[in-house]
Amino acid sequence: MHEIDVWVLDGWPDPGALEEAAVPLLEQAQGIVNVVQAAASEWSGLGDAYRAAEAAELLAVFGTPTRVSEGLRTGLAVVYRALMGYADTVRDLKRRRGVLLEDIKDFRQRTQLHLGEAAVFDGVPDRQALGGSSGASVALELGELRQRVSSLAAAHEQAEHDCARLIDGVRPIDGSVPVYYDGGMVTDATVERTRSRLKDLETAEVVGAARSVEMLELWKTLTPGQLLDYGMAESDFLRSGFTSPPLVGQVRDWWAGLSAEQQAALLVAAPGVIGNLNGVPYKARAKANRVNLDSVFKDPRTSDADRAALEVIYDALEPRKGNDEDPAAPRSMVSFTPEENGKPLVAVAIGDLDTATNVTWNVPGMKTTVADGLESWTKSAQDLYDGQVFADRANGDTESNAVVSWVGYDSPDAPPSTEVLSTELAKAGGAKLAEALDGFTETRANAGDDGGGPQLNVLAHSFGTTTASYALKAIKHEVATATFFGSAGIAWRDIGSAADLHVAKDPAGQPEVYVTAAGHDRVAPLGIVGSGLRGREGRWNPSDDWFRGKNFSSEGGYDPETGKVYTRTTGHDAKGWAAEGSADSVLAATGGHGYLDPDTESARNIALTSTGRGDLIQELIPLRREEKPGFGGMDFPKGPLIDRDLTSEELREELRK
């Protein structure tokens, strides 16, 4: 009665095996090209030993081997991209399959209980034992699970078809017919003129948006094979994004006008451009950025220090382990700059940026680099994502969320550097952030979202609040909410109040800009006070009245309705790490007591503000404090020592003591 056919989800290939099969293809093909070119070069050196006609005839002999080797390289590049793309898709589908199979297992256990005697007490069905299920809801859930199985099987079938279509399109190589598998052949002379113009544009002194638009249009005239050849010849240039990109709408129309084969070729040929180009779907950008990451990592010119930083990106892209109640969200790299000011920049998305209905950009503060910060910042982004999912469920909503761990600007070094006292890096980073935010809004709006597109939120920490304030003043499209925590100050001469930021307003006309600062955060005030040493560049605390933001507490307490205890934030960090009573704990948050650590009051409230529920923030009953000796003999108030959450009755009893 409750059977679900899952056999259609069997027999999928191993993604790792597909990748192992694909990787050698390009290396082997390039090796053949190198051998032929070397031979041609050696024979050309003998030209003086022959009459002109004989020399020309001799060198012409190498024409066919050269075309064959280059055609082979092009064809194998197509096969490589097809297999790698298929492997990425299968890996994601297998993750989704695991979640689905756990859901089916849970459903079967609950419905068996529903039919057995264990679910009945005194003749009355126990709805809690049934998971709250009725016959109608069981039938509905069964239908939904069957539909998920069918959809997943269809997705794999489509991925398999797409891979086969690309590979089947590669034509046999006979020395006279190039491997142009889309039928869009152009003459060699035209290709040479196009390549020549592209080279001129690459080296042009003026690098405005018009140059970028022309390059895109020239790429559109090339076949996939020609694009791959171009990408191999100009790989260094194509590792980075456009400095002045086209309008998002122009990119949208251009991308839609390409064939599927051209799109696939560009992911390999121009990964740095496509991976950072607003208007291109984020799933495609992620694939291009992965190609770019792999290429830079394997490049012998990459230093050991840079390679170590890239390893951190690989680790950050691994989803956390999920379970049937909280399935792991996919992770992807939605922007990647291999090097800027001597270090890489990256944005890692948790969730699907192409489909999520609630999206949050998470902006870090000082000393957050890929090498030293991405790991912790992405863990905090995951904690935020989990908190948002919990807030949705607690309020009966089914929003889909995504959080971007944005290490996409050059953040200031920690003291003794004085960079954090200036607004220079905040202004530069703010311009980058504004481009990313507006780019997201326009990309999703162009994708035909109903109801005005997804809700976009900005969350920022420490110096990141300074950076975000400049971005929020500059953006063209309003965001839904902004939340600042542990702020290093806002430049009051540039931003007069929260009303200067392009953030939506509540029914009373107040901007949805939220602020929190923990009482034991001793670092943020230092940045604010220190910035005043620079005179006119001084920054003020957004928690104060001048900013007119919506303040909330990070001090912890008991939920007055449920008795659940929320801990307080004990330092400046988003993710606490210091041992209690240690020298580090004077400035750093202790383990589990950072602003974004689960079960802190700050994390609970931030999950609410970043899902449009700031109005649900409530004042907690203060924690029962115990004084414990701290570092240097000082006393630090601690939360209550309890083994479990209190019921409302127990809480009232505790408060009476």
Image (tube, rainbow, N blue to C red):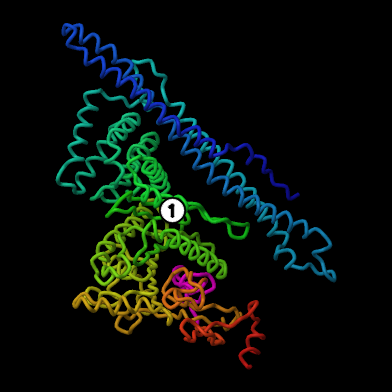
Residue on which the image places disc 1: 312
Image quarter of the C terminus: bottom right
Q: Is residue 642 left or right of residue 360?
A: right
Q: Is residue 240 magenta?
A: no
Q: Amino acid at mark 1?
A: Val
| 30 on left or right of 649 | left
Q: How many numbered circles does the render carry?
A: 1
Name the spot of residue 11 as percent of width and height, x first: 62, 36
**Rendered view: 282 above or below 413:** above
Q: Nearer the viewer, residue 192 or 565?
A: 565
Q: Residues within 10 Å of mark 1 (few under 14, many from 20)?
A: some
Relative to 101, does residue 510 appear above or below in the rendering? below
599 falls in the magenta region = yes
Q: Residue 103 sits in which quadrant?
A: bottom right
Q: Secondary structure at mark 1?
A: helix
Q: Which residues are magenta?
A: 592-618
Q: Is residue 325 above or below residue 519?
A: above
Q: Residue at x 43, y 26 (%)?
A: 169
Considering every residue shown, the one lying at the far bottom of the view is 656
Residue in view at x 23 percent, y 44 percent: 212
Point out residue 654 in the picture as x, y percentages from the top left corner. Answer: 63, 88
Out of 266 and 84, give the one closest to the viewer. Answer: 84
The outermost residue toward the front is 632
Residue 450, given in percent of the width and then of the height, sits at: 42, 57
Examine the image and state in which quarter residue 262 appears.
Answer: top left
Q: Nearer the viewer, residue 283 or 489?
A: 489
Q: Position of residue 340 (x, y in %)?
A: 28, 53
Residue 32 image-quadrant placement: top left
